[in-house]
Amino acid sequence: MLRRREPPAGPAGRSALAFALEIEGASIDIYAAAEESILQGLLGRAIIARGKLVDLRGEGLGEELWPASVRPAPETRVTGPG
């Protein structure tokens, strides 16, 4: 599920980290410079994202998803017995 997050503040803040992807109890920040309008329309929805997972822990940050494409996930219908 795509959600909004508060990007880090300060001189070294990264305003492009305004979104995060929640997956199975974990959260991955999305680096989306100049793509805010596209992601804004997908907030609160399940998405399919393809891109590169970049590990910046060596620089004192964390893991980030650098998306190449993002689209809404198809809605799944749950059917019960009968």
Image (cartoon, rainbow, N blue to C red):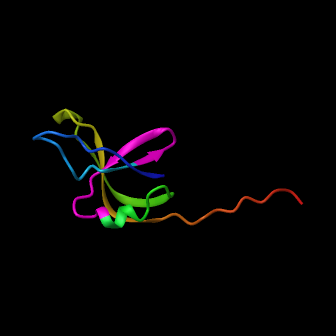
| Quadrant of the rendered image containing residue 55 | top left
Question: Up-down: is 63 above or below 49?
Answer: above
Q: Which residues are magenta?
A: 21-36
Residues 68 and 38: in front is 38
> Residue 79: image x %, image y %?
77, 60
Q: Is residue 60 magenta?
A: no
Residue at image location 32% in from the left, 59% down from the top = 67
For the C terminus, the image quarter is: bottom right
> Residue 69: image x %, image y %?
35, 66
Q: Residue furthest left?
A: 11
Residue at image location 41% in from the left, 41% down from the top = 27
Residue at image location 35% in from the left, 67% down from the top = 38
Is 80 on the left-hand or right-hand side of 66? right
Question: Up-down: is 19 above or below 57?
Answer: below
Is 45 on the left-hand or right-hand side of 30? right
User: Total of numbered circles in the picture?
Assistant: 0
Question: Up-down: is 49 above or below 5?
Answer: below
| Quadrant of the rendered image containing residue 32 | bottom left
> Residue 78: image x %, image y %?
72, 58
> Residue 81: image x %, image y %?
86, 57
Residue at image location 51% in from the left, 57% down from the top = 46
Q: Is residue 25 magenta?
A: yes
